Image (cartoon, grey):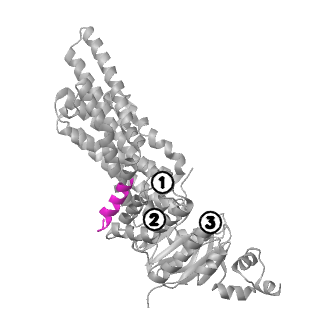
Amino acid sequence: MNGGAPRRVWGLVYRHLALYRRSWPRLLELMYWPVLQMLVWGFVTSYVGGNVGAAGGAAGAAGVAAGVLLGGVLLWEVSLRSQMGFSISFLEEVWSRNLGHIFVSPLRPRELVAGLACMSVVRVVVGVLPAVGLAWALYAFGLFSMGPVVVAFIAALLLMGWAVALGVVSLILRYGAGAEALAWSILMGLTPVAAVFYPVAVLPAWLQPVSLALPAAHVFEGMRAALLDGRVAWDHLAAAFALDAVWLAVMAWVFLRQFQAARVKGALLNIGE
Amino acid sequence: MPSPAILVEALNKRYRNDAPAAVSDLSFSMPRGATWGLLGGNGAGKTTTIAMLLGLLVPTSGRVEALGRDMARDRFAALARMNFSSPYLALPSRLSVAENLRVYAHLYNVPRAEARIAELAEQLQLSDLLDRPAGQLSAGQKTRVALAKSLVNRPELLLLDEPTASLDPDTGDWVRSWLERYRAESGCSILLASHNMAEVERLCGHVLMLKQGRVVDQGSPAALLQRYGRDDLEEVFLDIARGRAREEAVAA
């Protein structure tokens, strides 16, 4: 990036921060789903844990199982909010018919990506932190009780969210705003194979390679190792970051190809339905 | 001798292989400090040409240089010194006028951004509107804000797509007077696409008449009026749009 790049990236971030400052429903929406998910899963784990205890099961084991579920919910929200934060910030430019102005400014595509990634981090912090606090207050589950490794888990999931979001933005460049539904649904669709709530080993053998190709599966295997065995699964952590690098490189290539294709088709001035 | 503000050589654009050319063999050289007009009916290729000049659209063949920079290889260096305004694009409606201008001051790396915004607000009579959301402004106010956005980086080259579309005559006249004064004071080069013939006649020193993606005639408004034996550019436009030859028009 050249000398003016940080300021151009800040310009884009400032545009979105100003939008949130003036639109409380958008701010509320950021927190709404993570908090709702946490409440539903929190009560489910309380209920299941209570039944296990009543049936004579070990209360400690029920507590650990609850922790695995709540940890899964919170960490998966990081990836979901990261992907949505990136894609929806791009869609805000489409909805406001501002994309043409952005693309005739000196903002480079990589700076656009950097700005959207910054907004994704902001949205994750605003969206997920209240749910983390609620898990601690209502269910005595501390996400950071796993130790500093949780920061690495969060980073790996953020990166995965950006990779998927680059794919979503590429589809919007290719198919117009008609592809916007994918911004909400695409990562949600990966939940069954992301090993969020159960180990990869639970999946049928033919599906396991698909699961292991996702950084998230390694993060959640690592989370279970931290919560159940109290150890850091360095192999899974390394695999998660390596896969993030591969996915980001592939999706960045797809994004740049679609961006160029949109310049050939003339789609940048009038991305719409 | 400085490079032209815009140099276009053998420019062609075909959106699909089986579609007719949107722009065909377009060449021109617009000198610095000039105001030129692009005239033509709907689908004549004005917006396609402007999009290629801005690097938003990749030509099928041909070459565009803006302010001496090749838009295929070095477009960001040129874009920092250019700007664009079109009624078909909007600014984020929930952001205030000041916030919108601040965003673009950052994107164009404008030094002393707040002073520049205050200066533009005063020149374009926006001072009382700075805190208003852009979406709550009238059409005339939005046009003035869009102009302020397009001038925030003191562009050396300004591309305007129908700058007074949907404005009442009084506001349209105000914008035209303001553009005349701004060009005289700043020395900025302006290329404007318009359907308003009186506007083009008043502002432009040279006009490119486009039809089906080709330049079918060009010259100063006075030269075109004389060539077609008409009293105003609207009649010249109709002669060209309806395919009447110059000789036929003069004879009529």
Check residue A66 for magenta coloring.
no
Q: How far apart are the two marked residues, 2 and 1, measured between alpha carbons? A: 16 Å
In x, y percent, where is residue B236? 72, 80
The residue under label 3 is B168
The Cα atoms of the two marked residues, 2 and 3, are separated by 18 Å
Q: Is residue B56 visible?
A: no
**Alpha carbon distance from label 1 to label 3:** 22 Å
Question: Mark 3 belongs to which amino acid?
Answer: Asp
Task: Say which element carries label 3.
Answer: loop
Residue type, mark 2 in image: Leu
Which residue appears farthest toward the right when viewing the image?
B252
Report whether residue A264 is seen. yes
Chain identifier of the residue bearing label 3 in the image: B
Q: Secondary structure at mark 1?
A: loop
Marks 2 and 1, the one that precedes in the sequence: 1
Mark 2 Cα shell of 10 Å, populated few (<14), some (14-19), many (≥20): many
Which mark, by number, is residue B93?
1
Quarter of the rendering containing residue B37: bottom right
- Please state, as top left, top right, bottom left or bottom right, where the N terminus of chain A lies in the image: bottom left
Residue that mark 2 sits on: B126
Chain at tag 2? B
User: Residue at the location (65% across, 77% down)?
Assistant: B198
Q: What residue range appears in magenta? A: A1-15
